Image (spheres, rainbow, N blue to C red):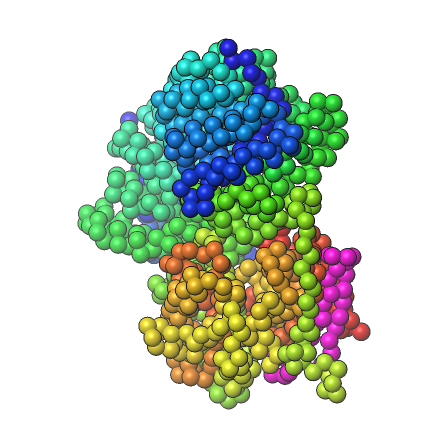
Amino acid sequence: MEKKFLPKGVIPALVTPFNAKMEIDEEALRSLVDYVIEAGVSAVSPCGTTGEFVNMTPEERKKVYDIVIDQVNGRVPVIAGTGDASTQMAIELTKYAEDAGADAALIVTPFYLHAMDKEVYEHYERIASSVDLPIVLYNIPQVTGVWIPWWVVEGLAKNISNVVGIKDSSGNMPYFMTLIEKLHGVISLICGHDEIASAALAAGADGVLLASANIVPDVLVEIYRAIKERHDLDRARELQRQYQTIFRFVARFGGPLIVKRVLWMMGRDVGSARRPLMIGGFCPYEVEDEMRRRLEGYGRIPRRTTEFELEPGRIFTSEYPAIPYTLPRITGLLLRVGEAFTSPSTADVAHVDLILGSKNGPVGEAFEEALRNPRPGHEPRIVQLNGVEVKPRTLMVPTVTIRTERHAKLVYGPAMEGVARAIVEAVERGLIPKDMVDEIVIIVHVFVHPTACNPTRIMLNNYKAVNHALKKAIECRPTLGELTERKESARHPFRYEP
Amino acid sequence: MGTFRPEGIFPALITPFTKDGTGIDEEALRRLVDYVIEGGVSGLVPCGTTGEFVYMREEERKKALEIVIDQANGKVPVIAGTGSSSTKMAVKLAKHAEDAGADAVLVVLPYYLRPADKGAYQHFYEVASSIDISVVLYNIPQCTGGFLSREVVEDLAEISNVVALKDSSGHLPYTLELLDRVGDKINVLCGHDEVVMPALAAGAKGAILASANIIPDIWVRVYNAIKRWDLGEARRLQMRVQKLARIIVRHGGAIPVKAALNMMGIKVGKTRRPLVSGGSLSWEVREELRLELEKLGKLEAVAPERKERRLLEELGVPVGSSFAVSVWEGSAGERRERVSVRIAIGSKDGPIGRAWAKAFACLEPGHEALLAVLEPNLMARPPTLILPSVEIRNMRQASMVYGPVQAAIARAVQDAVEEGILTMESMERDVALVEVSVDPDAVDRRAIYTNTYAAAMTALRKMRQ
């Protein structure tokens, strides 16, 4: 059966930018479209899952189709997300998208009230027969609670001429392999799960339609080209592996939320996700912090000359990987406080409280006092990496009373190594000006649970937590705004009885 | 044949192992049998899930069963856990149980390599056919990875010595479907400690429970209350043990049961590896378990001695001197949930700042200072250090402070900023020290949170006057 449009390549599942009033931010949307097209994507897809279609009115969705089609202006195809729980609404939106000039429609399976095979088949059949627009089926059981069985896909693909593809976001490779087995060359097979993008492309996927293509479209385009144009699997694998944390976080911790926060950190403000999604909920705070640390490592957080005023008139500068919250001049370095918690593994979590400040101020004084009068069970250590003291001088204080040899080994071994690595890296990355390292000192509270057991995780959790806490100390975060917004819904895990 | 039909309360006996873990602690097992029989149970179930059968060799399972039968000495019937992944082994163990004098066998759905309906049916059929004593089917999807299908149960119920089914799923629609389909043929027994009362009220004939090792008497009272159709009493008793039941079901079964028995002085040793204290049962939850046992009168509460220090003064905060910084006080709550706070807020470059940094760097054993956070990754500003004035001696006390107190102080500080008691400048310029006094006997986390918050707000509002 001849298909008139077969989508392929890298296709970002565009976020829908909202302004402060949580209305569609047309300007930001247009700018985002240009950004991804310039990075070389093959098509764009507004109003999908990442586009928060489910929290938008039909009128808003139509408006977004119009804006995106207008801004794309024929440069690449537009695949409009027109799915809905109701067949009638899906038809209305698909017709609108066709009239507006979309090149295809991406239609998710019905959700909430779980339809059976027959009902899913006829849902798509009715929509497809109401338009000439090419239709891409969309399987995302994580959110719909429904799988499209492969035999339903096969039936739709072979019997309805304008069913041209399927996007499978399940991440279930055996399912995707069945689609390839049955339908390769019949319709486009698009992978929608960021974590297995290169694996799916290598196995025979025609394209990838991904949330992470808002953030790193260039990386995904390079992966796609390496596989499809140069048959260079090693290169694709290397890139996928390098960015896998980004892909994993995007896929597992609430698409639109984290994608929007990351774009904001990278200097592209697309607003927040609509409620009920909240940072700190489905996407934990530590994921956002870790995403930032990773992106710093890839050089994707813009660096800005930042001044550190140690005391009036004494200024040090660094090229600081800055987000909009970072002030151009950091003052009040007498005493700064930051806190961070990282997981996983309940037993091996890190919870770091950290203070930094001038060696001539209260922090320096406390540093010396702690060394003079070590408290039993909380003996402080000057942090070293491979036998060399790190700079700035850092004192580590264990918060859980040390009672066993095993516990002591984990605290002064892997936990300290994590702290040390984070401090060294912070100076390398410009979080602390290089020429200021002899002027300040740091004191870190390290929490290692008495039942902790995994040295590698203890090291990595402390390494991440110290990086996060340092930035919070320097940037005075959480800010008043963050605290005001987040205090009501805050849920301390130990506030509740088991 | 198969005339014994279990009704009533049955403990799923734990298996005490010797100190070195290599054998069964016969003496401890016999003591436990006596303890639960005195508690009024209707029978005993050794070598079930709670009995760690899956970590025991064949000979050990046989030996444990023989000890239990001998110690029960005909006072109550014995239902032997003889399940196995392999049909051949399940048959072998069932035959041994019959020879050893057990009244019934409890046979779990095969696990790991999970059979479909045919294999499941054949497994139970072959076991039932190999013996004359009663067979109890056993559904526990949390462990086996799947439900015993309702259709298979319907067919198995036709076999003359299949007399009962133990359902540990806790899934009441499943339990009620079985009552509907086969309730007239076999006895449905509840195996999930959290839903005993509703299952019995719906028509289950009894229960096989991990927590009946610990509180056999209470479960017997629940059972008797239902028999009398005194639903109010049954519900009241179920609610009394609900948290204990929840901890046992959700934190590792055998681990919390053994921990509880050991606390009560019925020494039964440890679980076998890989199960280990501090794993499925965290140390924090273990202390909650102790608390529940105290409430139920199974354990005498030992009130820790209250040692309190004036930490603000010790840190050199010049309270009451001629350069006095103001310290604001507040308290709230009654008896053991009463909380008192003393708050000092001041500039980082002043005496409070110095004291703050010192308290942070020099953690006092038993009075470890910690930052106020609304939750992890959301610290309060101005940065606030909590100083627990009452010595912390155990995990329960610790978890009252590192949770309810930590969150309540943070919330109070942030609300004080919103109310304008603390200014925006203060968020950057100042630090706060909050000395908090929480009774060592405190048990109610919600009350501690509420009272800490109220005490802190009282203190903070005094600043305005």
Q: Is residue A373 left or right of residue A117?
A: right
What stretch of residues is rendered in magenta? Answer: B325-353
Residue shown at 45% from the left, 67% from the top: A466
Q: Is residue A339 located in the magenta-colored stretch of the structure? A: no
In-front residue for pair B64/A418: B64
Please tell me in which quadrant of the rendered image residue B97 appears: top left
Residue B62 visible here = yes
Please, which residue is most extreme toward the right here? B465
Residue shown at 42% from the left, 22% from the top: B96
Q: Is residue B346 located in the magenta-colored stretch of the structure? A: yes
Q: Is residue A244 depicted above or below B257 in this figure?
A: below
In-front residue for pair A321/A51: A321
In-front residue for pair B133/A420: B133
Residue shown at 39% from the left, 71% from the top: A420
Count of marks overlaid on the render:
0
Residue shown at 60% from the left, 58% from the top: B394
Q: Is residue A457 left or right of residue A356?
A: left
Image quarter of the C terminus of chain B: bottom right
- The location of residue A339, given as percent across then percent down, is 53, 66
Please tell me in which quadrant of the rendered image residue A332 appears: bottom right
Residue A13 visible here = no
- The location of residue A396, given as percent across then percent down, is 47, 72
- The location of residue A138, given as percent across then percent down, is 41, 36
In-front residue for pair A374/B385: A374
Please tell me in which quadrant of the rendered image residue B456 appears: bottom right
- The location of residue B222, given as percent across then percent down, is 69, 30
Q: Is residue A18 depicted above or below A321 in this figure?
A: above
Q: Is residue A23 left or right of residue A102?
A: right
